[in-house]
Amino acid sequence: MVALVATLGFVSALVFLAIRVLPGDPVLVMAGPDANPEVVARLRQAMGLDRPLSVQYVEWLGGALRGELGVSLQYDVPVGALIVSRLPVTLPLTALAALFTLVVALPLGVYAATHARRPGDYVTMVVAQVGLAVPSFWAGLLLILLFSVHLGWFRSGGFEGWTLGFWAAVRSLLLPAVALGLFQGAVLIRATRSSLLEVLGEEYVRTARAKGVSERLVVLKHAFRNALIPVVTVAGLQLGQLLAGSIILESVFALPGLGRLALGAIAARDLPVVQGVTLFVASCIVAINFAVDLSYAWLDPRIRYD
Amino acid sequence: MTSRWRIHVAFVVGLGITALLVSAAMLSLVWTPADPLSMSIAGRLEGPSRAHPFGTDQYGRDVLARVMAGTVTSITVGVLAVAVGAGVGVPLGVAGGYVGGWLDEVLMRLVDAVQGFPAILSALLFSAVLGAGITISTVAIGIAFVPAFARLARGSFLELRGREFVLAAAALGANDARLIGRHIFPNSLSPLIVQATTSFPVAILAEAALAYLGLGTQPPQPSWGLMLKEAQNFLSLSPWFALFPGAAIALAVLGLNLLGDGLRDLLHPIRVN
């Protein structure tokens, strides 16, 4: 827990320092290079930039801990509220992509491991290599080209919200989720195959087979759970990457999520929003990584954290 | 023997594709089928033809020439980003692994924090203050590689600093710099080289993604990601415009991944068997 707090402290410091210490004046970024010096001075005072850096950081961090991340210059609403308003797009997109990844990758990984060095294994590994090589946003464009432009089965982008119904919303997120999950799915296929292959070579698996346990039970009951530890590591780390990757897919499919909010904020020089979104996403990724660490102990009782 | 042969096939295919990639980049420095920046209003969004094998874009620029020139952008960003990641990450890992104690704890928490910043987040932050550009995207991608290099270097140093040959050198009077530079670091290079190789295709993907979002390479400089961004507006009108730059990214990444996989297996033959 101390490690998590220390890491989140570093995350907040990095986000804060990136805006305040990097060359480039945040006030001039927001006000524009031709702004009236009086306006610049007022903005600097309003943002508290005339005070020592350490005081600014402590105040900013205190506000962030209370969920107060400043006010958006573009929308004139609290940044925290803006972030919350975009979560119903970004979080379901990430969750759907993670679901797609698990549903596709785990069975394929198990299949490849149980058919190792046979044609089915090679085909699965080629599929995984292609998944690793195709950039998510290009996959998104190809999916739009096929399913929206040619077949007309899905809209090419946009999201009308959850009020129109659960399935209508899921339908809007389906193509971006598939494009987003492609790369992570490929990583997970390889991780599952590799981990299961290693476990299938263990003595106790050989013993189970010698006792006449069916191959299906050997794989699912004896081997799979023990093969899960490295797979959970990879899947957990991928979850954070999916959250960050959703920023790209939101841009491809014009989805009003966190990514589009941040990209719009850069164009509008809305620094509090950029800072707020970055802090939120980075903190989520760090928290997910720690949760993955803790899940080891649950999956493998031999592992204990002091 | 059979599995080793198969690994070599992957390695050779990867090497072949990578050689093609590097050749295209080098060739584009001295020759392209057309000027990648030259516009032609009359020849906009043409399909593939003998004059323009990959067609033309919305400004009538030759897509093949731009794909070739984009190779230079990708390779340059890839090499520099890996250099940034290794240049920052390895010293952090060496310091943590060799010194240990509270310094190691603090550095590892810092590395954990940096892991919360995939390239896209760092690029968002830096672009907000400094403006988007290829330098920003290179540094952002490099920062995303820091944790992997730091952890690998730390792991190697933790393992090697207690080994007999290091203890013997210390007993003979070798100072810290000599122990690190002459004895430990050379023995920890192999995983770092593999990491650099596997990071390179990731950097190419990230460069393309950041350029696509407008946070990386800026127009009119050719970049595969930027070309895909431009192609998106003409997807139904000129689908090939989106096909060739995307295929170039996929081919390059596939080749480099195969090369990296092969190299890893060759450097760690135990993993293969």
Image (cartoon, coloured by chain):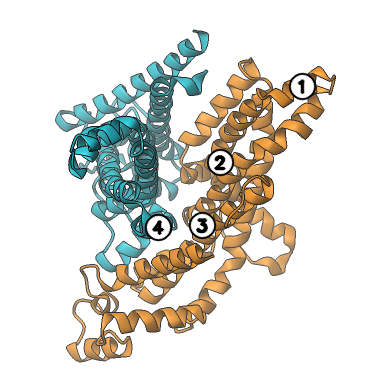
Callout 3: residue from which chain?
Answer: A
Above or below residue A181? Residue A82 is: below
Residue topped by disc 3: A250
x 41%, y 29%: residue? B251
A247 and A187: which is toward the camera: A187
Measured Cα–Cα span from mark 4 to mark 3: 37 Å
Residue B77's x, y, as percent? 27, 43
Is disc 1 placed on a helix, strand or loop? helix
Chain depicted in orange: A
**Mark 2 burial class by Cα count in 10 Å: few <14, some 14-19, many 20+:** many
Residue type at mark 4 is Glu
Label 4 in the same subunit as label 3: no
Measured Cα–Cα span from mark 2 to mark 1: 37 Å
Q: Nearer the viewer, mark 3 or mark 1?
A: 1
Residue type at mark 3 is Glu
- Residue B120 relative to residue A211: left or right: left
State whether residue A22 appears in this view.
Answer: yes
B229 and B49: which is toward the camera: B229
Residue topped by disc 4: B105
Measured Cα–Cα span from mark 3 to mark 1: 50 Å
Measured Cα–Cα span from mark 1 to mark 4: 43 Å
Mark 2–mark 1 contact, CB under 8 Å?
no
Above or below residue A300? Residue A204 is: above
x 51%, y 13%: residue? B3
For chain B, the rendered hue is cyan
Measured Cα–Cα span from mark 4 to mark 2: 35 Å
Is disc 4 placed on a helix, strand or loop? helix
Callout 4: residue from which chain?
Answer: B
Residue A228's x, y, as percent? 66, 40
Mark 4–mark 3 contact, CB under 8 Å?
no
Residue topped by disc 1: A207
